[in-house]
Image (tube, rainbow, N blue to C red):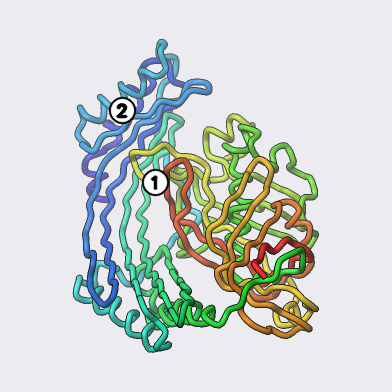
Amino acid sequence: MDLLAERLDEVLIREVLTAGLSRGGDFAELYAEHKRGRALRLEDRRVEELTSSLDLGAGIRVIRGGRTAYAYTNVLDRESLLEAARVAAAGAQGEATRSVDDLTRPDRRVDHPVRIDPFEADKEDLVALAVRADEAARDVSGDVRQVIVTYLDGTTDVLIANSEGRLVDDHRTRTRLATQVVAARDDVIQTGFEGPGASAGHEMFDSHRPEDVARAAARQAVAMLDSRPAPSGEMPVVLWRGDGGVLFHEACGHGLEADIVAKEASVYAGRRGERIGSDLLSGVDDATVQNGWGSYAFDDEGTPAQRTILFDEGILVDYLSDHRSSRKLDLPVTGNGRRQSYAHVPIPRMTNSYIVSGDADPDEVIASLDRGVLCKGLGGGQVNPATGDFVFGMTEAYLVEGGEIRHAVRGANLVGNGPETLRRIDAVGTDFAQRQGICGKDGQGVPVAFGTPTLRIARITVGGTA
């Protein structure tokens, strides 16, 4: 924070915002960022990548009515910032009618303390950490053929100010370790993946030891070597804790982002207050989860992080909004304005989105299947936000008959519709797990987490090959 504070005092901030309003803008914003990070990739026991990065810059956004103009610079001196502000201001094309309000700092609602700074570990430490994961994965089975370990860390300092008087600074730390394992036997090749991350330092490895992460990925890959072709047709499906969050994120969460709603390109548009899902369904987006992978103290527009209820016992409660979409839809700002970097405009994004746990015993949920599929892993998929239709691949799945898990199945897809699937949830477990990933939208990637308890969907189409 010191570097941004040194270069951007309140006098200069006001100058930049005033320049942004100079051509008739209704709103001007300065977003400055100082980011550093490291990346390591170990593949086939060799270090293929070990890099450090450093970035510094600022973006100026000017809004007039429904129009947005944006300019950015990677030089944080007075003239470069004012020039960027003048470029953004030119998008307004008019005479200045507004001034900058007095700058004030909103209260922080949450902190994400870091106990072990990741940069205390040098490059040799990081290589040793990756090697531990590699060796643990290979120890799982002689069928393991390839192990790829990826480590990422970084800190980001941001300073955000706008013409409505908001002035915010935030310090964010993130650490992630991912392992991908390929197993092969005869003509069958399968892949497993595990990739925990947190808004934290190396204390993350207290609960996610590198060996455990690697073994989980290897177990997935090896288990699927014994899989058989998947059945097809409409049947009950149990989504194992954690991985159902991918479905909730993709098939529901994106349709609740207010920019998509404002374009009426979402199946959920205009349906606040309407019963969409089963009365067993309650879901939230929560940027206040302490040290959560998708968490922060303030979003990238300076709005304090908050927990937003999306579904309450099946009723659609709220959308996820940023400054611009909230004005367009006349909704409160929910603190979901996020951007990949200073070179990008903020847009509504999820943070940590998940379905809240229920009261069903997870083992009994599985035992309740007379014939169905237990899905422990979901992979790449496609979703049409306008209709809610989706298709997802199942990366780890098992046939269940008579309440017993029979064998792994491969080549299975889940085909359905978001609102219909939410209505068909008829059991919600007491357990809970979450996953972490990078969510792409409009060319921007941001860290997100998603999770669920064990869920049973009464009927859904399984696209199999048997």
Q: Is residue 452 above or below residue 388?
A: below
What residue is shown at x 68% (from left), y 57% (from top)? 415
Mark 2 Cα shell of 10 Å, populated few (<14), some (14-19), many (≥20): many
Q: CA distance from mark 1 to mark 2?
A: 22 Å
Number of marks in the rendered image: 2
Could you tell whether 353 is left or right of 91 in the image?
right
Could you tell whether 90 is left or right of 289 in the image?
left
The numbered dot on residue 126 is: none
What residue is shown at x 64% (from left), y 44% (from top)? 319
Could you tell whether 49 is left or right of 458 in the image?
left
At label 1, the amino acid type is Gln
What residue is shown at x 41% (from left), y 75% (from top)? 181
Q: Are the residues flagged by discs 1 and 2 in contact, CB closer than 8 Å?
A: no
Q: Is residue 463 above or below residue 179?
A: above
Q: In terms of image quadrants, where is residue 230?
A: bottom right
Q: Position of residue 212 (x, y in %)?
A: 43, 82
Question: Residue 80 versus residue 259: which sits nearer the camera?
Answer: 259
The numbered dot on residue 16 is: 2
Mark 2 residue element:
helix
Question: Residue 429 versus residue 170: which sits nearer the camera?
Answer: 429
Mark 1 Cα shell of 10 Å, populated few (<14), some (14-19), many (≥20): some
Residue at the far front: name it: 187
Q: Is residue 85 above or below residue 462?
A: above
Q: In terms of image quadrants, where is residue 76?
A: top left
At label 2, the amino acid type is Val
Q: Position of residue 174 (x, y in %)?
A: 37, 62
Residue under circle 1?
340
Mark 1 residue element:
loop
Q: Position of residue 333 (x, y in %)?
A: 57, 40
What residue is shown at x 57% (from left), y 45% (from top)? 334
Q: Position of residue 84 (x, y in %)?
A: 28, 27
